[in-house]
Amino acid sequence: MVVIRTLIPLLKGLAFTIKHLFVKPITYQYPEQRREVSERWRGLHRLKMDDGRLLCVACGLCEAVCPADVITVERTETEDGRSFPSRFDVEVTRCIFCGYCQEACPKDAIELTRNYDFCEYTREEFNLNRDQLAKIEEA
Amino acid sequence: MIPHPDPTQETLVLNMGPQHPSTHGVLRVLLKMDGEYVIEAEPVLGYGHRMHEKMGEVRSHNGFYANVGRMDYGGALSFAHGHVLAVERLSDIQVPERAEYIRVITTELNRVASHLLWIGAFLLDLGAFTPILYSFDDREIALDLLEHVTGARITFSYFRVGGVCNDIDEQFIEGTKKFIKRMRERIPMFHKLVTGNIIFRKRVEGIGIIDRDMALRYGVTGPMIRGSGIPYDIRKVEPYSVYPEFDFDIPTYDEGDCMARHKVRMDEIEQSLRIIEQGLEKLPDGPVMMEKVPKKVKSGPGDTFMSVEAARGELCYYLATDGTDTPYRMKIRSPSYSNLSILKEVTSGILLSDLVAVMGSMDLVIPEIDR
């Protein structure tokens, strides 16, 4: 009697599992099939360009607001008196992807892209500088 | 700390953890055992300590806010809610009503996701592999909805002092309504598959009984105290945010065993769905962020205390400030820490396999215990 009482729920569960064999799978075959992430996704950083010029004016607000202190900005001026970052470094491994920098930016110059899978072989390769950040494409 | 058992008594000292699958992280439990029976179980903490409270004292309120989600990866938004409410209470900031509704809706959605994570992990501890796949199927939808609004799946960083950073849109509202409908069909399925299952019932019924007195003595909160028959829920006993506007119940069970805690959490999912449903119905129009948010959230010297109901129990923030935008002292009372303290008393004399069931039913999140 105990055996039957134990077996019936087992078989019920098994029947439920077998039923799921014929349902469309909910998983993604990852490298071939990529998941669409939301428009607001906070992924790898990128510096926006306009006509080959960086939008960033090196005001340093992102540097000030960053809770993890991963952004380093140094300011310089072009000959026509425009502010310009001579240095803009992001240590991506230490970044916590909170999105404060893109919120703080008055020029909308830094944004977190939808790029969510980035990997390198060494830690140094994750210390992105200004030109590398500008080259990252919008995903 | 390390017990020295009498060798003539044939007791065995066993380390469960720090790397043990059923401790859900890096919790170490020192077990003094007699055969298969646990004489004493001593949790050893600190393997995942990251000095969150100290970080709260060197960073500004907004800077620390990014941390709070890291403490409880299961229900990050409840932790965020507590923090922003504490800071707002400290500096007398009024939040637009729509923002507060959005906070409650997303927090409750996160609570559902957290409980679904718990069901899967709890049953996995007990040796049932399949239910986690079904519960994660549902949790995935909740996380997708939250991702659509907040931009992240676990560490949301969505609330701000003074509101929320982004408004919710029609797609989120439609998706949430669909999710509620779907969950209402799935909960009976979970009950049929799990709660009524004789194997499961034999594992959890009458195991790890926490009576009312013991629960009160240890300051246990959340679904654990409600499983012992005490209807203690901060959302009702000390209402905050816009919770008084909603009609919902506090499920309680008197048995105090693992089964009661399981039933409480299952019923709580339904109650959270009710809150979300009402929230979407009543959602007022208006801004989601207060006008002129100060760049530095400052307040006069003073202190404040705020407690909210997180997915695992009562979560309290104590902030003392000397007038700058950085707290002088920050103390966090996290629910799992107090819930774990009961382990020693409740598990003495039970089987090792039942200890796993008891720990599973506590819904431990180790980063939140260690902080």
Image: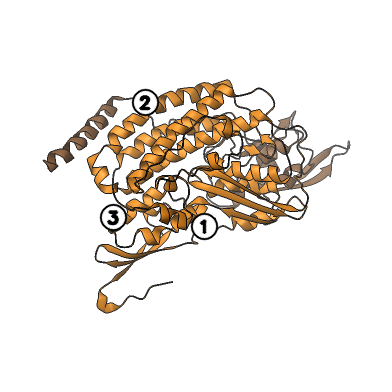
User: Looking at the picture, which amino acid does disc 2 mark?
Assistant: Glu
**Disc 1 sits on a residue from what chain?**
B
Are discs 3 and 2 less than 8 Å apart at CB?
Answer: no
Q: CA distance from mark 3 to mark 2?
A: 32 Å
Q: Is residue B4 left or right of residue B145?
A: left
Nearer to me, B182 or A20? B182
Are discs 2 and 1 less than 8 Å apart at CB?
Answer: no
Chain displayed in brown: A
Question: Which quadrant of the rendered structure holds the N terminus of chain B?
Answer: bottom left
Tell me the mark number nearer the camera, choosing from 2 and 1. Answer: 2
User: Looking at the picture, which amino acid does disc 3 mark?
Assistant: Ser
Nearer to me, B308 or B17? B308
Q: Residue at x 36, y 48 (%)?
A: B256
Q: CA distance from mark 1 to mark 3?
A: 25 Å
Q: Which residue is mark 3?
A: B353
**Disc 2 sits on a residue from what chain?**
B
Circle 2 sits in a helix, a strand or a loop, which is it?
Answer: helix
Total labels: the figure holds 3
**Location of residue B269 in the rendering, given as x and y in whole percent from the top left corner:** 43, 34
Q: Alpha-carbon neighbours of circle 2 within 10 Å: few (<14), some, or many (≥20)?
A: few
Q: Which residue is mark 2?
A: B185
Q: Is residue B201 left or right of residue B140?
A: left
Circle 1 sits in a helix, a strand or a loop, which is it?
Answer: helix
